[in-house]
Amino acid sequence: MRDPHAVIRRPAVTEKGAALKEQNKYCFEVDPRANKLEVKRAVETLFNVKVTAVHTMAMRGRVTRLGRFAGRTPDWKKAIVTLEAGHTIEFFEGA
């Protein structure tokens, strides 16, 4: 089993994530090599909650420009985690 801190990199705090919070769903940026079971175990271990579903998606990096030079931001993986009714993550509640 991998370290939960290595699986979950950071919370993805966006407007869509704030809207999903009303449905008891939370967004995280996760390690691209992590699968759904690893994400589920990591969230349950770190936040002491019960996870009912995990949806993952591979996000492509965006093309950025600085003057005449173009580059790309790195690709990353997003996970939307659904919690059991009555469970919340306090980290998101303060935001």
Image (cartoon, helix red, strand yellow):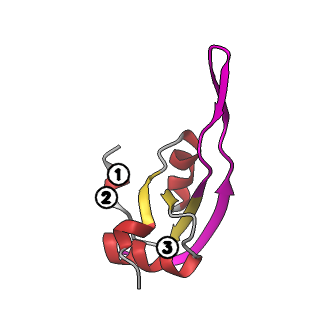
Task: Tell which tag, 3 or 2, sits nearer the viewer.
Answer: 3
Q: Looking at the rendering, in which quadrant would you find the N terminus?
A: bottom left
Residue 77, given in percent of the width and then of the height, sits at 59, 58
Look at the numbered disc 1 and give the secondary structure of its residue.
helix
- Mark 3 or mark 1, earlier in chain: 3
Residue at which label 3 appears:
39
Callout 1 touching callout 2 (CB < 8 Å): yes
What whole-number distance in Å separates the C-alpha atoms at marks 3 and 1?
20 Å
As shown in the figure, which amino acid type bears the numbered disc 1?
Answer: Glu
Q: Which residues are magenta?
A: 49-77
The residue drawn where x is 47% and y is 73% is 85
Position of residue 89 in the picture relative to residue 63 (left or right): left
Tell me if residue 48 can be seen: no
Most extreme residue toward the front is: 69
Q: Which mark is residue 93?
A: 1
As shown in the figure, which amino acid type bears the numbered disc 2?
Answer: Glu
Residue 60, given in percent of the width and then of the height, sits at 69, 48
Res 67 quadrant in image: top right
The residue drawn where x is 52% and y is 54% is 22
The residue drawn where x is 65% and y is 44% is 61
As shown in the figure, which amino acid type bears the numbered disc 3?
Answer: Val
Q: Which mark is residue 90?
A: 2
Rendered view: 18 above or below 79: above
- Taking depth in this image into account, of 84 and 69 the one nearest to the observer is 69
Residue 52 belongs to the span the image colors magenta = yes
Position of residue 31 in the picture relative to residue 44 (left or right): right
Look at the numbered disc 3 and give the secondary structure of its residue.
helix
